[in-house]
């Protein structure tokens, strides 16, 4: 299998789906001429032309609203938000309309649209531009929320998202764009929506993670393996729908679980994951479920303080060791 | 029944000083000679700061920085019209405004170096924090103007933003509410022709930005944004009108972003060198200097000294900014809320004492 970056894998998925289906179109701020602030839309304008690849004015709520209208009008739009932080300016269209129109029409219309949004912290972009908002989206019924961690999943999930008839929030991590991994060559390669993947098998502790946190969890598992502690790493890939089965089965096997989230701890998705683990395998648990989360503060601008806020590999290692100390 | 014209639109453009340094004496604002020279020194200081910030960024000593090159007259000219009690809402490209209002330069460098402590505005300066989100501060400015009116304060509010911000709902809703309430606010748009890679013609189909104000019931004017006298005059008049209860004004400063969008950008990928060269000929510093030379206010020697002083000021500021001690973990939480939640207190204790984030 060829190696490619997460960025190139996304770019390939966009090109393949636009070639395959002439109703697939894309727009957003600086996506056409500039080829995206993270260069994910490289080459699209040149290949597909201005009608299908558009730069919009700086109007986030309308970028999403127009995608909703176009999806109802028979297209498969992919709207790019320059970063997920600007989704907050489009929250009415995303939550009040995108996730509800199908329901309010009694199923007469579908919204086959994708909203792509880079996000996450760690690039020293300060309080308003470093957020992890995944919990906000998964809270609202009516959309899929996808969070790929590897180039292969990025490509496979984006292709599935574009083909799917539901609205999809597709969350890319800014620090993953340059990461490399093997990606299957088959042009029909897709990853099913709503399926987690066991990225590493182990017997001692289950680590549940997503997006960049999966990469950290795998690194922590490597470190721990050298000390004779074997972790099973479940990569969620999709937060909605959520594949509860896969991580519950894993936690039942190991009897111990650590859930990792990049977002704020308070009302973060880790609490939800923990409750599902308790519900699904209470009798098999041998320790309380541990959460690794971001600190409950706005992201600082300072490099030094920013690092203190974002979960690190060593936090996962520490949490795994904590769960091993407990004995129910 | 005949079709009657019931409204028609005219948009004025104000120009006082041309690129060769010739002024329309009838329109010249009544500034004493020392004030004109101070204006020029502030233009030089702004540019000296900008040059230094760009080189510090290249050396990895500060982070991403948005240059103001070419926009100095729009910034210094408008800032010098601001009175002490007025409130200022900058966007992220207003270094020249901040410098002209006396914001400490070392704090600006500290901020762009990735340290929020640089945003703590010294007492006596009513400058709100830099707003990196495009246009989202316009409603705040309108609210501050409403507060000033209700509290019977004799001040005006001034808000800065770019051409790209005129596409935002915040712009339209903020303008509309300012118009409906007749509030003391001056909106200054630096139309620098570009919003990252999107030219202004792709941002709006309207021929000028100034005309947008008319739809909200107040005046919009365009000024030559590279003409410090025109900017100063238009802003002084608009602020005076606002303070006297005359309502809002919109000023479009027609200017140009000579540099890249930020240090993370490469503008040569999307615009021509010829366009940039054309605008460089309209340099805002040069025309004021030519004017002063013609008036016998300025010599080659003065020019050298002004740059010398500006560079020394910036050098000192760099030293001061770089000698600031790094922030401590306590600062993470210190300003997050007026009172911390119990969970935040536990998190602070854990991170400060043990360096771990996993406090429940
Ligand atoms: C709400 C929002 N959307 C998008 C961005 C990303 N962004 C930062 S600056 C910019 C262009 C702004 O252009 P303009 O308003 O003309 O100001 P200029 O940069 O030219 O000073 C964009 C799109 C942002 N910061 N905030
Ligand atoms: Mg602009």
Image (spheres, grey):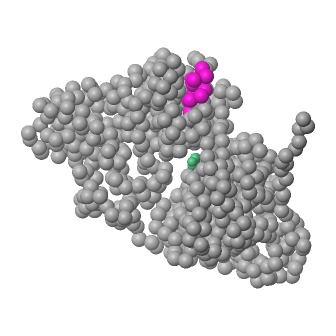
- B174 or B281: nearer the viewer: B174
Q: Which quarter of the rendering shows the C terminus of chain A?
A: top left
Q: Is residue B272 magenta?
A: no
Q: Is residue B243 above or below residue A104?
A: below
Q: Quadrant of residue A151?
A: top left
Please give left or right for residue A7 compared with residue B85 in the image. Answer: left
Residue B342 in view: yes
Please give left or right for residue B215 compared with residue A139 in the image. Answer: right
The number of discs equals 0
Which residue appears at 83% of the width and 59% of the height?
Answer: B13
Residue A184 in view: no
Q: Quadrant of residue A74?
A: top right
Q: Position of residue B222 (x, y in %)?
A: 79, 58
- A136 or B330: nearer the viewer: A136
Q: Position of residue A250 (x, y in %)?
A: 22, 28
Q: Which residues are magenta?
A: A68-80
Which residue appears at 81% of the width and 74% of the height?
Answer: B29
Q: Is residue A2 above or below residue B313?
A: above
Which residue appears at 57% of the width and 53% of the height?
Answer: B136
Q: Position of residue B73 (x, y in %)?
A: 74, 66
Which residue appears at 42% of the width and 32% of the height?
Answer: A145
Please give left or right for residue B313 compared with residue B274 in the image. Answer: left
Please give left or right for residue A253 compared with residue B356 in the image. Answer: left
Q: Residue furthest left?
A: A328
- A1 or B33: nearer the viewer: B33
- B72 or B339: nearer the viewer: B339
Q: Which quarter of the rendering shows the N terminus of chain A?
A: top left
Q: Position of residue A137 (x, y in %)?
A: 42, 37
């Amino acid at each position: 299998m060829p190696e490619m970056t997460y960025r190139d894998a996304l770019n390939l998925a966009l090109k393949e789906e636009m070639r395959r289906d002439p109703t697939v179109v894309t727009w957003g701020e600086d996506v056409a001429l500039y080829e995206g602030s993270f260069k994910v839309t490289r080459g699209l304008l040149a290949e597909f032309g201005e009608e299908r690849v558009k730069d919009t004015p700086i109007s986030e709520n309308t970028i999403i609203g127009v995608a909703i209208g176009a999806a109802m009008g028979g297209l498969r739009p992919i709207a790019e938000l320059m970063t997920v932080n600007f989704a907050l300016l489009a929250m009415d269209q995303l939550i009040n309309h995108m996730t509800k129109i199908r329901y309010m029409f009694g199923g007469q219309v579908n919204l086959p649209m994708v909203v792509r949004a880079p996000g996450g912290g760690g690039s020293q972009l300060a309080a308003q531009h470093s957020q992890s908002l995944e919990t906000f989206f998964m809270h609202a019924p009516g959309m899929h929320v996808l969070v790929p961690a590897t180039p292969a999943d990025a490509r496979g999930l984006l292709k599935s998202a574009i083909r799917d008839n539901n609205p999809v929030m597709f969350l890319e991590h800014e620090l993953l764009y340059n990461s490399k991994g093997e990606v299957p060559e088959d042009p029909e390669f897709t990853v099913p929506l709503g399926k987690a993947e066991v990225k590493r098998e182990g017997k001692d502790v289950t680590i549940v993670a997503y997006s960049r946190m999966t990469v950290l969890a795998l690194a922590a598992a490597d470190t721990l393996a050298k000390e004779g502690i074997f972790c099973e790493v479940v990569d969620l890939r999709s937060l909605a729908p959520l594949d509860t089965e896969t991580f519950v089965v894993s936690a039942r096997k190991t009897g111990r679980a650590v859930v990792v989230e990049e977002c704020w701890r308070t009302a973060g998705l880790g609490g939800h994951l923990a409750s599902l683990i308790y519900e699904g395998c209470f009798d098999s648990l041998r320790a309380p479920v541990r959460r690794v989360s971001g600190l409950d503060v706005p992201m600082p601008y300072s490099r030094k303080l920013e690092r203190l806020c974002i979960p690190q590999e060593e936090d996962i290692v520490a949490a795994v060791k904590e769960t091993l100390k407990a004995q129910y | 029944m005949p079709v009657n014209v019931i409204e028609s639109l005219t948009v004025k453009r104000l120009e006082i000083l041309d690129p060769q340094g010739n002024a329309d004496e009838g329109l010249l604002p009544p500034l004493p000679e020392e004030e004109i020279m101070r204006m020029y020194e502030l233009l030089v200081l702004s540019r000296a700061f900008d040059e230094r910030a760009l080189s510090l960024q290249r050396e990895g000593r500060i982070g991403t920085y948005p240059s103001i090159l070419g926009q100095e007259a729009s910034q210094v000219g408008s800032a010098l019209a601001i009175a002490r009690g007025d409130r200022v809402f900058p966007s992220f490209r207003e270094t020249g405004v901040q410098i002209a209002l006396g914001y400490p330069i070392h704090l600006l460098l500290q901020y762009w170096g990735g340290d929020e402590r640089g945003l703590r505005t010294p007492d006596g300066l009513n400058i709100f924090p830099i707003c990196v989100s495009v246009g989202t501060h316009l409603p705040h400015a309108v609210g501050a103007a409403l507060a000033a009116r209700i509290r019977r304060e004799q001040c005006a509010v001034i808000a800065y933003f770019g051409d790209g911000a005129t596409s935002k709902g915040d712009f339209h809703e903020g303008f509309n509410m300012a118009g409906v309430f007749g509030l003391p606010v001056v909106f200054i748009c630096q139309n620098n022709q570009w919003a990252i890679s999107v030219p202004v013609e792709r941002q709006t189909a309207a021929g000028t930005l100034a005309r947008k104000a008319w739809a909200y019931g107040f005046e919009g004017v365009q000024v030559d944004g590279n003409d410090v006298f025109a900017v100063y005059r238009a802003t002084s008049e608009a602020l005076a009108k606002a303070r006297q209860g005359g309502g809002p004004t919109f000023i479009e400063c027609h200017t140009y972003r000579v540099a890249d969008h930020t240090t993370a950008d490469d503008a040569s990928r999307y615009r021509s060198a010829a366009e940039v060269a054309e605008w460089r000929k309209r340099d805002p510093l040069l025309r004021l200097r030519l004017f002063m030379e013609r008036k016998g206010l300025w010599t080659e020697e003065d020019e050298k000294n002004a740059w010398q002083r500006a560079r020394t000021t910036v050098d000192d500021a760099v030293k001061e900014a770089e000698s600031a001690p790094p922030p401590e973990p306590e600062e993470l939480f210190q300003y997050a809320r007026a009172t911390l939640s119990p969970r935040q207190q536990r998190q602070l204790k854990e991170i400060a004492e043990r360096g771990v984030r996993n406090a429940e």
